[in-house]
Image (cartoon, rainbow, N blue to C red):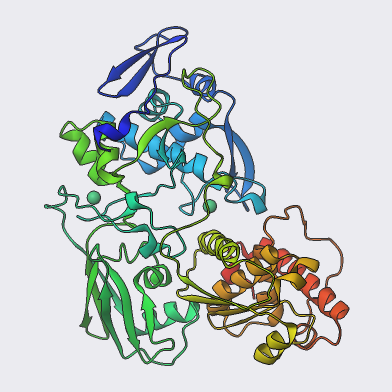
Amino acid sequence: MRQAAMSRLWCRQSATVAVCIGLLCLVRLSAGVGAQESPTDADLEVASAGRSARIGVTASGGPKPTKIPLEVYVARVLAGEGEPRAAEGAHRALAIAIRTYVVANEGRHHREGFDLCDTTHCQVMRSATPVSRAAALSTAGTVLMYAGGPAEVFYSASCGGRSETAVAVWPGLPDFPYLRPVDDNVHGNDSSWTLDMSSTDIRKALGRAGFTGRRLTGISIDQRNDSGRVSRLSLKGLRPTAVSGAEFRMAVGPTALRSTAFTVERAGRGYRFTGKGYGHGVGMCVIGAGRLARAGASAEKILGHYYPGLSLGSYDGTPAGPVSRTAPPAATLPAPRGISPISLMVAEGSGIDRADLEGLAGTAFADLSRILGVSVAPVALQMHGTVESFRRQTGKPWWVSSAVSGAVIHLSPATLLAQREGVEATLRMAMAELLIGRAFGARPAWVRVGAARYFGRGASAGRPAQPGVLECPADTELLTALSASTQRDADARAERCFARALVDAKDWRDVR
Ligand SMILES: [Zn+2]
Ligand SMILES: [Zn+2]
């Protein structure tokens, strides 16, 4: 963060004494608890000013929503994600990044009845420590701001020397200027990691991600991106014949293949991957932040290094703060802009503005690729102008609203969709179907149709799996329904079947 960009900083006062170091304020409680005592959860609850987050806690079985005061949550996540022995500046910087993530991602799991989960998908929690509580309290209410609202930020364990562009990992995200590669010159003495894996194991892992083929006979790096990480690998003997670096890492296992900053060579009956860093590498590097703090860097300096150009501010709803700047909730942040992985064809007479459709498609893509942990690029979207054109190109009957073929989505005219489930809902269902398509391969149609409806209609929460006998529709019922009403019935049953199966499977990829 450049000093000039930090002008929006504020200091909490009231019953506390705010000590400003540079531009960042360190708050020490002067009443209630003595300055020497460790803060408690009760102190953090007070500092949360009524704000809380609903966290899906996976202690036993599925995630259960638990309401946690915001600053208590920040302290717990900091204990889970931070380096226990790092210097104060690193803890404070990470506390601010964690809080920003919560505020910007409110409702990420709204379909399941909570905001964030407690796995690496969102943020991992541990028992708070005196150090993590102190860092949460001393930065309470402070978030990173971008374009008038809480910024979309990420952090990862170790960048290995250069951080990663967000869009390289999540192609649906806007190309935020503060999430582009920066050099991190604190990794000079890091040793590299290696992973040896047999061709068969790699093929099996890719098979689970939807790749087909009996033998993997070669892997080579096709392309690296600006950060030097692998952006595309070519796969001899499998279909598709190429995979993005991020997707490959997820398929093989993100803890086995620690990052996409690797080289690959043949080794015996398999391959040896040699690399640097751990994690996706986007945004703040936790290891690097620790090293900068040890060398004396403040939280402000650390955040400025990893998120250049962002400012600090307060989220809405902290009466103790002297500045009552209203930050828009995450849901009203501008729709994704910048480089879009989606190409659009909007026919004349379709009844929707190109810019409107682009906005809906970008948001649907970004949301769903994050929720599902899958991304596909590029995606083509064709909005037809007439039902005839839709029928001709897709071979579907008139009552079908969308058709997905590979990475192409066909939509019936918007005027028609508006009378059915709506343009946005239809688009989201089709987008979900496209994203999950590859992972599902040859499973029964109800899995694909059900998952597409389940995730696509996420906004309409509160559809409990109904008890009683529920027969999953056969492929013929879904794919060659005889009328609009039998189609609707089959689609609805597919969705309920999927919702029911997901309860047991936990991961959508395992529903079959
Ligand atoms: Zn999550
Ligand atoms: Zn780093």
In which quadrant is the C terminus drawn?
bottom right
* Residue at (45, 6) in percent of width and height: 31
Q: Quadrant of residue 54?
A: top right
Q: Quadrant of residue 3?
A: top left
Left or right, 241 with respect to 308, comes to right
In which quadrant is the N terminus drawn?
top left
Q: Is residue 22 above or below residue 60?
A: above
Q: Nearer the viewer, residue 484 or 92?
A: 484
Residue 470 picture location, percent across and down: 83, 70
Is residue 91 visible from the viewing direction of this image?
no
* Residue at (29, 24) in percent of width and height: 23
Q: Is residue 213 above or below residue 90?
A: below
* Residue at (45, 66) in percent of width and height: 340
Q: Is residue 364 above or below residue 12?
A: below
* Residue at (30, 63) in percent of width and height: 259
Residue 251 picture location, percent across and down: 42, 72
